[in-house]
Image (cartoon, rainbow, N blue to C red):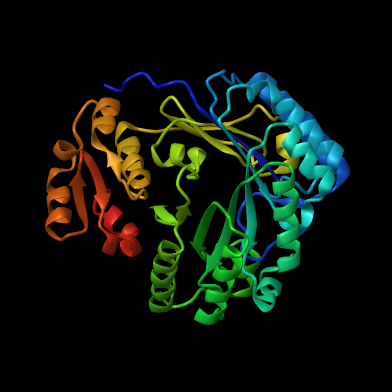
Amino acid sequence: MMIETEPCRHLYIHVPFCAHICGYCDFVHVICRRESVEQWLSAVIKEMEYVHIPDTIETIYIGGGTPTSPDPDQLDALLSAIDPYARHVKEYTIEINPETLDETKAKILHRHGINRASIGFQSSDPSLLALMGRKHTMDTMHTCVSLLREEGITNLSVDLMYSLPGQTMAQLRQSVYDALSLHPSHLSLYSLTIEENTVFGKMGYDHLDEDSEADMYEWIVKTLDEEGYTQYEVSNFAHQGCTSMHNIGYWQYDDFIGIGTGASGKENGSRYDHSRSLSAYIKDPCHREMIPLSKEDQMFESLMMGIRMKQGMDLSVFEKRFGESFEHHYGDVLSTMIQQGHMEIVDGRLRASEKSYEIMNSLLVEFM
């Protein structure tokens, strides 16, 4: 028997607008036009009024798209609509493409209590930035970071990508060192995944071979450790006290509310998706495609998310949540994984061994 779900503590809002489209992006996105933003704002405010957002919300994450691409007054209107739900929020994050931030927008973010920014950096190499369709430079990055810090927004995360088409180890090293020169409190480093409907997918680009990708990942982990960043998840590194509370909620398999075009959420044993079509969402912002999750689905997803964290998945939480122990449910395959050195149980947590991070997906298949 499933236990009663705890009240949601996490709110995600998807802003689908971008000034331009990046070659690798598979998230819901449309070119930012003022009239479209106005229509979307009316719709998203309607959805927020319709949906029950409890006062237990502790993290808000505004993603995209590029949430800072709309005009300042539109950004202010969005954040004003969110204000009533942000009273008890501990971590309030917004994603930023550096070329879309100016002094006016930085002041708006500060005024509404945003205390964390996730900045799309990806690379500092001009040729790779051009390949991806990115519009910023290192000067743009420094300006963006300075504007945020001047407003007291100092918990800054920087996103980087590796295994880009044609990327060399020298290019990766330079990009990582350039990112470190910004003194971020958090870094996320993701290997390129090419989806069919992206610009990269349509043009036939591919990521690097597995050996090159593994070499890059191992260098990243080693270098960031030497630079004082703790790896707390497969792709995420942070200074002490600067881990992402919102993303940890995902990895702990907490429920979360999703708002906006293309957003997803998970509540009370079901996942739901909003339409990826901007026009369909504007027409009916309260429509959700509900996807009931079986107990088996939820147990596997809890494992899939939990072992991404370095500290692993709390087995006592698993047993409380699902009414049976992980060891009992997955006994044979778990024993095999432990014997092969891929997993271990330490202090009541199941975690993947260091050598298994790069083959995580193939290991998870064994639990399905």
Residue in the image at 63% along x and 25% along y: 86
Depth check: give the residue in front, 307 or 236. 236
On the image, which quarter does residue 104 sit in?
A: top right
**Residue beneath the point at 64% across and 23% down:** 85
Where residue 163 sits in the image (x, y, percent)? 50, 72
Image position of 119 with respect to 316: above or below: below
Give 317 or 86, whichever is nearer the viewer. Answer: 86
The percent position of residue 154, horizontal first and vertical second, equals 63, 46
Along the line of sight, the residue nearer the viewer: 51 or 122 = 122
Q: Is residue 270 above or below residue 65?
A: above
Judging depth in this view, the residue of 147 and 258 nearest the camera is: 147
In the rendered structure, the answer to whether residue 350 lies left or right of residue 43 reads left
User: Within the image, what quadrant is residue 81 found in?
Assistant: top right
- Residue 249 at x, y percent in the picture: 45, 36
Quarter of the figure with the N terminus: top left
Q: Position of residue 165 (x, y in %)?
A: 56, 77
Position of residue 79 relative to residue 137, above or below, is above
Evaluate whether residue 127 shows in this view: yes
User: How many numbered circles are shown?
Assistant: 0
Residue at the image position 34 percent from the left and 39 percent from the top: 302
Q: In the picture provided, is 255 more to the left or to the right than 294?
A: right
Quarter holding residue 336: bottom left
